[in-house]
Amino acid sequence: MKLTDLIGYSFGAMRERKLRAILTIAMVLIGAGLITALNGLTTGMYQYIGGQFGTLGANVVIVLPGMESTTRITEQTASVIKQIEGVKIAVPYVQQTATAQSAGASASVLVTGSDQRYLKDIFPTLEVAEGNLVAPQDSIGIVLGHSIAYPPDRPNPFARVGSVVSISFSVVKEKLPQTVKRSFVVRGILGEMGTSGMFLPVDRMAFMSLSAASSLFGTSGDYSGVNVITNGPDEAERVASAIRRLYGRSFEVYTSKTLIALIQNILGALSLFLGSVASVSLIVASVGIFAGLYTSVMERTREIGLLKAIGFKKRGILGVFLAEAALIGIIGGVLGDAVGVGLGYGMAVVMGQMRGQFTAEMTAGGEGIGYISPYFTPENFLFVFAFSLAVSIIAGAYPAWRASRLDPVVALRKE
Amino acid sequence: MEHQALIRTENLTKIYRIGSVSFPALNQVSLEIEAGEFISIVGPSGSGKSTLLNLLGALDRPSSGHVYVEGSDLFRRNENQLADFRNKKLGFIFQAHNLLMRTSVIANVALPSMIGGEPRGKRMRRARELLENVGLGDKLRRKPSELSGGEQQRVAVARALMNQPLIVLGDEPTGNLDSKTGAEIVALMKSINRERGTVFILVTHNPEVANETQRVIHLRDGRVSLVERIPG
């Protein structure tokens, strides 16, 4: 029997029980669509995070205060780290969110004070678009990130090189909230980095000298962290473990690699969980296929007897019913892939809005992480298609086997 | 060369066991059927007519005894070979529910040729010829449900002839038809038998049908009680 004839025959049988066929296909479609969408969302998020941290130099080690530790990072910490083999320079920094105001407009910025001679070591792709960086002794100069200077949602620039920008932030002194405000002169504007989200939002940062930031925020010798620049990317992990050995759990130590790995681990666990939920829906679909096909075999006993009488072999009958299961899997899988793409984009928009509100608070009124485009790979489509097909054929195996084993004499007697 | 019957049964026996009780549905039946014959099998309910037909149709295996077709022992073949035998050498006509209601008349007729993988165009051409022969040349694309009972049986006859079989087996082929339509179907089968030499073996309750055949095999309690030759 030819494959085209077999498929034609099975398709005809499905059309005879149209509603049942449509419902079983819909079950597969929902499962396959969910898996496609979730895979696409996760891949999109992986890529987003990879892109966010791609701006961080591979030879940089970030040292931050420990989450459960009161050990402070000071000039002394920086000089100890500087002694570690493989370290080129340790650049301490002071960082705090503040409000920048210029000509009536205001913006939330992440102010970073550090020695700017090493800025290009930390962010290798960073370019100064206009003006210059701030010199270490400069106590009134400031460099603005690209989307601070040129807000994407406003037609006019926020500030230009040479403009005066005031930086203000709230502080509680003697139980009274006070606003500290100081003016700075824009020395330079950075080129666009494409990172305005929650992680390393260089485009939404403002840079000044370490002394200026320390004085502005009154940090009295405490640093927010140290960016350690090593002699090469290969040294980063070694230096990181040396620092961990030195300070134990007092400090958190990250390399760009471990940062990405950390977040992707969390994401991986999440996607595994979501993936299992979606897979369950496909497995539920297999129960539907099983029930539908099994009922079909019972209803079509007489037909099976007839087919045997005119010379269908066991494997021919098996083929007829397996082809039906396979068709359900193929149609459900292909449509699931297509619907999954739409579902993925829809979910990305909804998730983007939710996450945008949530992360905006974390970035102190910044735009947060909004819409992240899902990313669909051929492997994703192929996997979902193959999974749908496999699940359908496995579900159809027993009903098909039962059909092939029917005794023609008994089957023909059934009215 | 020694004369060889087209079909020969030798002590053909089928015993059904229900629990500890065994009951011979067919008991030591030996028959010879010649090429070109038109035969009916008659007998009361439970006489073994259908059992005999199922064995001749290779749908069931005997408890003992043999069926020789063209000199070769049918039941020495395995299941797949029996399926091939049914497909190539036999045609079946049943009392009712013979046809696939979802497909066209012509697709029903062509179905037996699909198994052998014959090209679609070729099998559709032959199915059309056969339907023209049975007088349904104008209803090729109809669904069986749009046809009368007599027309449906004509489709079944055409399908039985699709692979140019040696033998057509009919299990009460006129059982669901009124006597006039039944007679027309019998006449159709007779003319095919005359023109093509195809052997017809019909199980029937109806003496009028039996009287139209050349030979009537009477069964009673699983044995051949009488073989009657109809003159004419």
Image: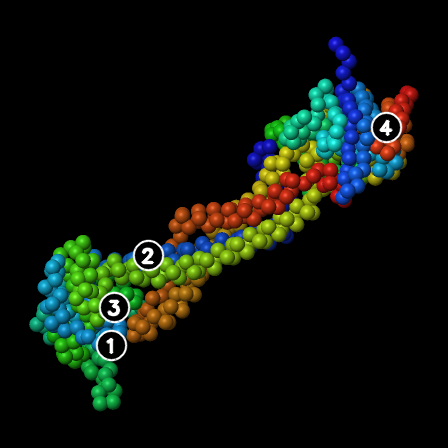
Indicate the chain on which mark 4 is placed.
B
The amino acid sitting under disc 1 is: Thr
Residue at numbered disc 2:
A47
Indicate the chain on which mark 1 is placed.
A
Q: Based on the displayed image, in which of its 4 quarters is residue A150 positioned?
A: bottom left
User: Mark number for residue A99?
Assistant: 1
Color theme of the render: rainbow
Is A335 left or right of B140, judged from the image as shown? left
Question: Which label's residue is closer to the chain start, 3 or 2?
Answer: 2
Q: Residues within 10 Å of mark 2 (few under 14, many from 20)?
A: some
The amino acid sitting under disc 2 is: Gln
- The residue lying at 24 percent from left, 76 percent from top is A98
Q: Residues within 10 Å of mark 3 (few under 14, many from 20)?
A: many
Quarter of the image with the N terminus of chain A is: top right
The foreground one among A80 and B156 is A80
Q: Secondary structure at mark 2?
A: helix
Indicate the chain on which mark 3 is placed.
A
Residue at numbered disc 3:
A204
Q: Secondary structure at mark 4?
A: strand
- The residue lying at 81 percent from left, 35 percent from top is B24
Q: Residues within 10 Å of mark 4 (few under 14, many from 20)?
A: many
Residue at numbered disc 4:
B224
Q: Nearer the viewer, mark 3 or mark 2?
A: 2
Q: CA distance from mark 2 to mark 4?
A: 84 Å
Is A255 left or right of A212, judged from the image as shown? right
Question: Which label's residue is closer to the chain start, 1 or 2?
Answer: 2
